[in-house]
Image (spheres, rainbow, N blue to C red):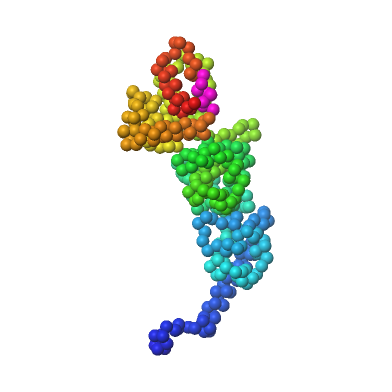
Amino acid sequence: MARKASQGLPFDPPSSPQRRSALNTDRYRLEGTYERLRRALVAGPQDGRIDQPLSYWVLPSDRRLPIVFLDRTLRDLLAQPLEDLMQTPGVGQKKILGFFDLLRRAIKSESADRPFGMAAEPAIDEPSHRRGVGVEPASVSEAVWREWCETILRAGFGDHALGRVAPSLRKLPTVIWETPLSDYAGRSLADIRLLKTHGEKRVNAILEVFGAIYEAVSTAALNEDLQLDVTARFVPELTRWLVAHAARPDKLTLADIQERVAKPLVRQIEIDLGEPVTGLASERLGFDGATPTVKTQAEQLGVTRARVYQLLEDCGRVLAVRWPEGRWLLAPLADRPAKTDPEAMGLIHAIRVLFYPE
């Protein structure tokens, strides 16, 4: 025996009785597991889940997937014995175990409309800081994605631009700020990932937007006589304030414009662009006194004047997608009677130049 081992020969040849016995035991175990899963699905709720393709239950983090099975429905796959499935080219024992994991998800799903992977709705008295903690892209399956899209489209948000409804624009590429939700809602996640320039970073940013909108819509108390809207938090309050005060602009003071118009817009810039753009915007509006020149701002940041102009232009791009109607709502404030506070008038002009340049 020692001589054979020194020659590199295995202790148990592949044809040994011990090896054959182990293979048979593994096969019996797989057969038993498959039959239990198949019976549970065939005898389970007839809600359409077994007519979904296997890919419906896949998560982006999954490994060992039987790729050749993903486009086939569960009904089609379960109609075959395990031996035939395992004889499929490219499908070995590890891929079969991955197949079993997907079958278990299909069994655990509450229904075809509430698929495995959907988080339970939070209790109404659950602290707000524990709700909506963010989307984990790796946990979003095709089933979850379809539920999100159907809910968002049903609520009438298909025409809304991604940038208008995103919690923040920092992770969202500017080239898709104006893209309607319906452009993505009509595609599967697999199709989106096949689009040009849609790598994981961009796809994850899209998932975060859809997840946030889904949470807002699915947890809202909808009423057929009331319209739900999803937009940046500053928009409704600022819109109402401008409409209410447009009739008497001569009564507005510098403090009014600072607190009710300028500061909410700058706070949104902080959410969407962060520093140093927020500081630049605050200085352009004179929050800290005299307005510095662009040259001074460039020297303070250690960048070129062209870069400062570019960052300031980004403020206008943000408001163009976040609150495009603001351009016209601010216009009446600029048509001031002679007795209007000149400092307030100057700030209104600065706001329009910064956020809604011609």
289 in the magenta segment = no
The answer to whether 272 appears left or right of 45 in the picture is left
**Stretch in magenta:** 325-332
Which residue corresponds to the image point at 56% horizontal and 40% vertical from the top-left? 179
Residue 328 rendering spot, x and y as whole percentages: 53, 24
Residue for point 66% across, 67% down: 80
Residue 117 vs 17, above or below: the answer is: above
Residue 196 visible? The answer is yes
Magenta part mainly helix, strand or loop? helix
Position of residue 192 measured from the top left corner of the image (x, y, whole percent): 56, 49
> Where's the N terminus, which quadrant?
bottom left
Please tell me in which quadrant of the rendered image residue 55 appears: bottom right
- 26 in relation to 177, above or below: below
- Percent of width and height locating residue 319: 49, 31
User: At 60% from the left edge and 48% from the top edge, which residue is drawn?
Assistant: 187
Which percent across, then down, holds residue 86? 60, 70
Whether 287 is drawn above or below 125: the answer is above
Q: Looking at the image, can residue 43 be seen?
A: no
